[in-house]
Structures are given as C-alpha cells and as structure tokens.
Amino acid sequence: MTGKIAFLRITVCILLPTAVSSCKKDVPLEEINPVPHAVKLEVPGNFPTVEQDLDNPLTAEGIELGRMLFYDVRLSGNNRISCASCHRQDLAFTDGLALSTIGVSGKMLDRHAPALFNLAWAKTGLFWDGGSKNLESQAFGPLTSADEMHQDLLVLEAELKQVPDYVTRFKKAFNEDIKSVNVVKALAQFQRTLISGTSRYDKYKRGEAGASLTATELLGMNLLNSKCKACHSGELFTDDGYHNNGIDATFSDDHEGIYQGRFRVSFDPNDMGKFKTPSLRNVMLTAPYMHDGRFKTIDEVLDHYEFGIKISPTTDQLLYQDQTGIPLSKIEREAIIAFLAALTDHEFITNKKMNNPNP
C-alpha cells in the first residue's frame, strides 16, 4: 500500500508541471519576436525611381515611431525643443528664419535650416556641406549639438524607457530595447516618407484630369529649364550637387570653416565656397534663402543671379563664362516666379500622415 502511494506521489509530481503549463495562455509568436510590416515608398509617377535602404528598411512601425520622435521634445536636453521646432510642416519643414536662435543655448546658428522633403533621393550627403552621409548619421548632429538640441544620448535612452508606449514601439519596430541608434533609424525612416510630389506642376506633368498651367507659368517653366537647369534639374529640381553660386568671393575659416562649404568636408580646394543645391520645390514657402538665409525674397535671389555674382576661383563658370549673371526681362522674371509658385505642394504641407500625432 505504501508503495502505491509513493508511486502516485511521483506520478503527480511529474504530471503537475505539464498540467499547469497547459493551462497557461499561449503567447503569440509575434509578441516574442515581433516582425515589422515592410513598407514601399509611394513614388510619384513623374519622379525617378528610388533605392530602398537595405541597412534601414522602411516599416510601418519604424515610420510611425519616427514620426512620434520627430515631434517629441524629450529629444532635447531641456525637454522644450523637438525636430519640428526648426522644421515646420506648414513651411515645407523649414522654420521661416534666416538663422535660428531657438536651440538650447539660445545662440544664433551659422546656417539656415534646410527644407525636409524628397530626402530618399539625396545620395551625395546631407547638411549644406554634405557633412553627413545619410539621414541616420545626420540626426546625431542636431541631437547632440550644444547649440541645437544638446541631448545626452544615454539620458535620452533613459527618458524614453520611462514611457511604456515607447518601450513597446521600439520592440515592435526593431525587436530591441530602446537605443539611440534606433532613435535615429526611426527618424530617418519617417523623413524618407516626406515626399512632395502633388503640386499643380506635378499634376500637369502627369496629365491628371483638370490639371493645367497658365501661359505665364509655362513660360516660366521653359525659362527655368533653359537658364537654371544646370543646377536645378529634373523632377526633383536639384542636381543633388555642390556649387559656388557667387554669393561670396572670400571664405573665412572661422567657426571651424563653416563658411567654406563643401571644402570643410572634402578638403579639396576646388570645393571652396560650394554648398548643396536646394530643390526649387516649395521654394515660395522656404524663405529666406541661401545657406545663411541672407536673401529674404525670391526677387532678391533673382537680383543676385542677375547683378550680384561675385567671382572667385571656384565660382560656377556658367555664371560668368559669356557674361556675368543671368539677365532677365521683367516679363521673364514674373514668369519664373509664377512657375515657382506652381511648385508649391499644398497637399504635402497639410498631409495628416506627417503632422504631430500628439498635438
């Protein structure tokens, strides 16, 4: 009898863990190892193709996480500044200032905040001098700059880990705990979705129903193609290159050579005073103009190209090889400005997929 009781005890001890475990709720595999949902960029029909970034492929989870981070003031050291503070959607993700002073230090920055759109096609570097290879490395610049967001990356990780929603979202997007490297990856994914290709010009170019340009706008388009296409070419209206457009004749080495343009990155004397060509898309929204915001209006920009070219050894020869500057009649100037206005993408600056998810 005693032997039977002992046998039963052993049997119960063996079977009990199995019985208990079988009562537990099965955990879905995707919660253990979440698989993010791949996303393909919606490229406008008149745009060139774009290569997928294999090191940071787009996912629905990564894009939405990047959008949240873009508008989150936790990314700054004083918890008052977000990426959107200097990159406002209503201004094509610029700030409307020549040189910003809203950084943590309150000091005036040395360069004008560039517009953020169609960045998936930017292959020759970012910043005005191309100092960052890609969007991921670029994001570390303002995040850690003492005059911009001035955030300690370890502190940022700790702050974000205090937010349960972020913990969940980072896990779903990257299957990892919160790390600064994934912060910039998420930001980069969101920024690659900032595609501006629904202006009146685009709809006309694609032959969409009801889309048209006026005779003045068409004249402006033809003038732009004949006089400006060397730098502002293709459907992106930029050659993604670097040029000295004659706004200065000398280039100070102050502030770590920031006024020397591409030269401070390449150390090639031929790059002295060259800066990245901005797109002309949404240009009516992105004033003031140039890398230092010196020109307040499009008229001032056209004045520069007609009368203000300063020649130095690296000035683009197209600006002075036959004659100095680009002469324009009053009618031609008005036509160019009219066409530039047709490049304004009102759908882009009101797209709810790009705005603050927690206003």
Image (cartoon, grey):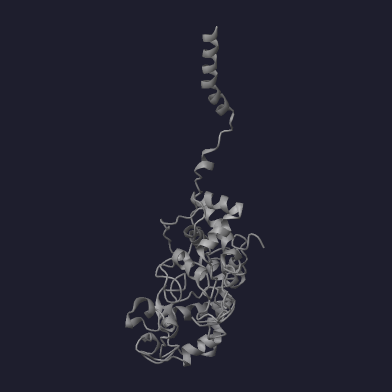
Residue 230 seen in the current view: no
| 221 lies left or right of 346 | left
Across and down, in percent, residue 243 comes to: 40, 80
Across and down, in percent, residue 15 comes to: 53, 21
Q: From what the image shows, is residue 230 above or below residue 74?
A: below
| 243 lies left or right of 21 | left
Across and down, in percent, residue 127 comes to: 46, 73
Of residue 277 and residue 55, the one placed in the foreground of this image is: 55
Q: Residue at x 47, y 88 (%)?
A: 305
Of residue 284 and residue 57, the one placed in the foreground of this image is: 57
- Quadrant where the C terminus is found in the figure: bottom right
Most extreme residue toward the front is 2
Numbered marks: total: 0
Most extreme residue toward the right is 359
Q: From what the image shows, is residue 28 above or below residue 61?
A: above
- Quadrant where the N terminus is found in the figure: top right
Across and down, in percent, residue 308 comes to: 47, 92
Most extreme residue toward the top is 1
Of residue 95 and residue 224, the one placed in the foreground of this image is: 95
Residue 241 seen in the current view: yes
